[in-house]
Amino acid sequence: MMKTVLLILVLTAGAALGSIEKRVTGWYTRYCRKGEGKHQVMLSLTTLRDPQHRNFSRVHCGGTRIRSRWILTAAHCNESDLTVLEGRQPDTAIMRRIAEKVEYPGHDLLLLKLRRRHGPTEKPKPNCRTSTAPHHHLEEVDFFGSQDAYINQTGHMFSYNAGTLRCGKMEVCNCSTRYGNNRTFCGMALHVDGNAGDSGSGALWNNKLYGVQVSGPITFNTRPTHFMDLCNRPYRQWIFNTAGV
């Protein structure tokens, strides 16, 4: 019997600029139900300016609240002007300032400490001692995102704002390539994929956080998505030592 993993991907407009991140798209996706993904946040860059020279924010990554003041995301999302946005859409989200950033040396994990305690309940840590952890081939992955994409004849994805949070499914699979020296697991599914825009979002199973999204394809359905494996003992110990989770 397939187990279900939740992969939270809050995806927003504007992320095609700058570094390649990750979004969700595909025919077998749906609009999410009310209340799904409350612990998910968006990470924004705030020093950009529009043609009228006004400051504005653009979202280029996602993250997962693991404690009232701590957000877990991918290290390659880190920028000097990074802030946290809470809400389902960037135009109505509340901005939260970051007090501290802590990277796992040499690996794609980043913890963000907020200046104040805010927001909904954090996601519980995984139970990595059980054999039912979501690392087994063909277990299903559910994921969320407010961005969709147009797909051209060559399979290249062009993202656009879907207007609200979307959900889809993929299956845990073997990783076709390594992701540097990082410990990862992978997911993939026919007609479902990510696109440029939301690295750092969480992979959940049984309502517990097991992974952080770090890499995926630019061309539709060409290779799996990588997630940092939070059942890796050094990663778990680092999170506990830093955030107390």
Image (cartoon, rainbow, N blue to C red):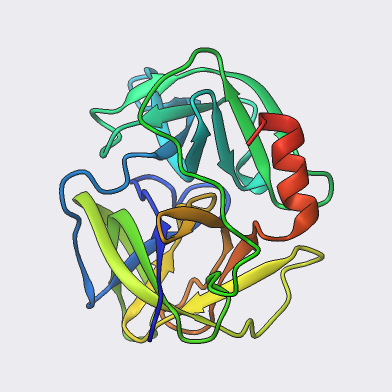
Q: How many marks?
A: 0
Horizontal side of 211 relative to 3 (left or right) equals right
The correct choice, above or below, for 21 with respect to 92 in the image is: below
**Closer-to-camera residue (7/193):** 7
Tell me the quarter of the picture where residue 77 sits.
Answer: top right
The correct choice, above or below, for 126 with respect to 245 in the image is: below
Task: Tell me where residue 27 appears, x and y as whole percent.
Answer: 22, 77
What quarter of the picture does the C terminus occupy?
A: top right
Horizontal side of 179 relative to 234 (left or right) equals left
Horizontal side of 161 relative to 190 (left or right) equals left
**Closer-to-camera residue (115/24):** 115
Task: Tell me where residue 153 appears, x and y as whole percent.
Answer: 32, 86
Task: Tell me where residue 7 appears, x and y as whole percent.
Answer: 42, 60
Task: Tell me where residue 239 appears, x and y as whole percent.
Answer: 70, 40
> Residue at the front extreme?
130
The correct choice, above or below, for 126 with respect to 224 in the image is: above
